[in-house]
Image (cartoon, rainbow, N blue to C red):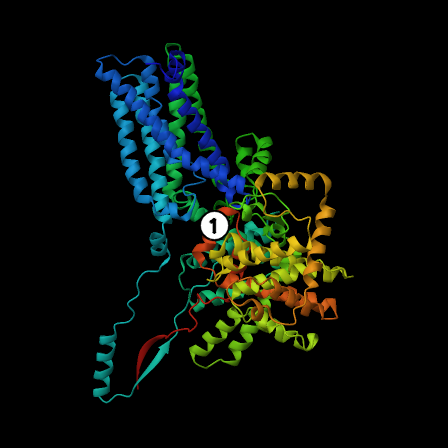
Amino acid sequence: MKEVFPPPLRKFWKEWELRGAALFSLTLQIILILSGNRRKYKCRTRYRVIVWFAYMLADSVATIALGILSNDLGQVNENGGNIEVGNELKAFWAPFFLLHLGGPDTITAYSLEDNELYLRHLFGLIVQTTAAVYILILAWTSSRLSYLSIVVIVVGSIKYGERTWALWKSSRNKLRDTILTDPDPGPNYPKFMEEYTLRDAEGFSVDIIEMKEGQANLDVTVPRKTAEKDVPAENEHNLVKAHALFQTFKSLFADLILSYHDRDSSQGLFKEMSDENAFNVIEIELGFMYDLVYTKAPVIYTRWGFVRRFLTFFLTCGVFTSFILDDKFRHNRTDFWVTVLLLVVAIFLEIYAALIVLASDQTRVWLIKHGMTSIRSLEELFKWFKVQRWSKRIEQCLKVPRWSKTVAQYSLLWPSLKEKLSHKIIEEYRYKEINKFSADYRKLIFDHVRKKFVQFEEQRKEQQGRSTSSLETALREVCGQRGKGVLDEYKEKIGQVDLEWSISVEFDQSILIWHMATEICYYSPEDLSDEVKLSRDFSLHMSRYMLYLLVIYPFMLPVGIGLIRFRDTRAEAMEFFKEQLPTTTDGGTYCAAALAELRRKICSSVVGVEKRRKKACKSLLEVRTDIPPIKVKGDRSKSVLFDACMLASRLKTISDPNVKWDLMRDMWLELLAYAACHCKGSQHGQQLRRGGELLTHVWLLMAHFGLTEQFQISQGHARARLVTK
């Protein structure tokens, strides 16, 4: 029978099977530690795919390598052969695979669901540690290498145990248990009533008074000796504020309710902040949350966590030194250098992880609270080691953004006009674009949220002393506004233009109608001032962002049939443009589409694309919409294309472009705030690993202003005390 693989190839595979697994496992570990925590500010899909592949393969490769080692050594023992020097050295690699299974500090879970698999990892810890010990027993020769293997197994078990522990602490149930305060049974009611009855029976005049209980305020003070140093005090204050707020507001990510005192403390801080500082504090908070659920932070930033770091580092360095001092000439040259590489990378990972800890916001907060300057801490540390010239370079490498500061974009026009070639499976992702989140946009959002806060405060003052239900109703009204307030505000300016029908429909329907109307109005020629252009650009970018959420992450929006409406609208738009713009690529074959795409790339430019979009919007605006589309088409198709045309036509009747674009800007701000309020905290937590979403920042900003239904409205009852007269 003819062999599939020739003997030389099989021999090569036999020699390099384990070496290849070791080197590949090392490569995956380097990718994970360098890229794991960068997910918080990297929003590109290709970057996430690389991290996902490395995360999924890392455990499998290490497990397979342990299996290969176990099989090879088992065969040697079965054949009654002695353990050769080469096999002994390869057996020394087994603890390193256990170390790799522990993973780097920068990533323990790829998604929140991975945290729920902590029991599987616990089982894996037991099985893989047993496998490493079994390999050690098979290859035991009482040599220096055998004893060094025990040390590395200890280090690997610590790392793997930390990973399992971190997954458990970040799991949904454990996280909720950690956040919840200790049970409070309250005063002894039977004893209180017994004392009240006795005193009343004795003829005393007994009164019951309420004793208000003091609440601890947020500790956001910076020690004077820290604030006096030549470091921007504002940054230090923001770090301390974010850390204090995070201890309370992380409950929102577990869908828990906060107290009225938490609300008042947060409002007191945020109503005095600028938009820049407010968003900076929120960035830091979300960074803390990312570390809590996706990294080993829950087990690192403790006293014993630092002890374990020092222990594993010095043990690894000791193993490396001892191995180098061993007789290296008795080992196979290739295997020797693979072993050296395993040790060097293990030490590098320890050093890099330590530097990340030193440069982290958690460490900075600790340094600030202990009167040290966090930003200069690394410089002082390296100065002590007399390598100050490295400090700035290392700090620069470790200084990373806290979120992507981008706003993803998706327009219904792009797939409808077939501007890019894409298969229908990846069409939604192919047409996504990324825009930077500017300071002007940040100020617009902050001012809008603060305006809603002032509105709620006025209502709360008016209803002071009334029932709790009236306050709940007022808060629900503020959080539930999705355009009605804007239309009321602009009622006098727009006259008899009827727009209310566009917001009285389902939320996803409103997004689609207003999105397409915004696109049509944007591409209509107008002479605008710079201030109005800002409102116009903001409206366009927010409309595309909201459609992006509806298409790519519909679970972040209120429940509806948004995807069905989007697909029906896109289909109708494609049919319409096929008739109106005959150069548009029809469905056709994929090859024909590819040729058309190539021709379009050669013959057209960005100017041509813009021209085409203007022509498409002009043709939509020319459609007569005197009769509502639903009366003509019925309800079978969920398309809202011509509803958007009807809205755009009515918006065009507003003579003052300033009023029109201000109205559209405020409408999109309202829709954005509504979506943020009605997205679950767990969904916001999911998005942290994708570079962060603007919607999450708006949600947390509104929560800090008390504009969320996840607060206890009433102040409850105070503790009672008997007074005898």
Q: Quadrant of the N terminus?
A: top left
Could you tell whether 201 is left or right of 119 in the image? Answer: left
Query: Is residue 34 placed above or below 627 in the rendered structure?
Result: above
Between 491 and 160, the residue placed more toward the observer is 491
Instruction: Tell me if residue 609 can be seen.
Output: yes
Which part of the image, by quadrant, shows the C terminus? bottom left
- Residue ID at (49%, 51%): 687
* Image label count: 1
Give the residue at x 39% y 16%: 5
Residue 300 rendering spot, x and y as whole percentages = 40, 42
In this rendering, the answer to whether 12 lies above or below 406 is above
Residue with the most extreme right position: 527
Q: Which residue is drawn at 34% across and 52% down?
A: 174
Of 445 and 249, nearer the camera is 445
Give how far across and how far down residue 71 sits, in percent.
Answer: 28, 22
Q: Which amino acid does label 1 sit on?
A: Phe
Residue drawn at x 34%, y 41% as measured from the top left: 164
Coordinates of residue 411 in the picture (x, y in percent)? 61, 54
Look at the picture and state if 372 lies above or below 489. Answer: above
Q: Which element is circle 1 on?
A: helix
Q: Which residue lies furthest to the bottom in this view?
A: 203
User: Which residue bears the numbered disc 1?
Assistant: 288
| Horizontal relation, residue 354 to residue 130: left or right | right
Asked if residue 704 can be seen in this view, the reply is no
Along the horizontal axis of the image, is 193 left or right of 335?
Answer: left
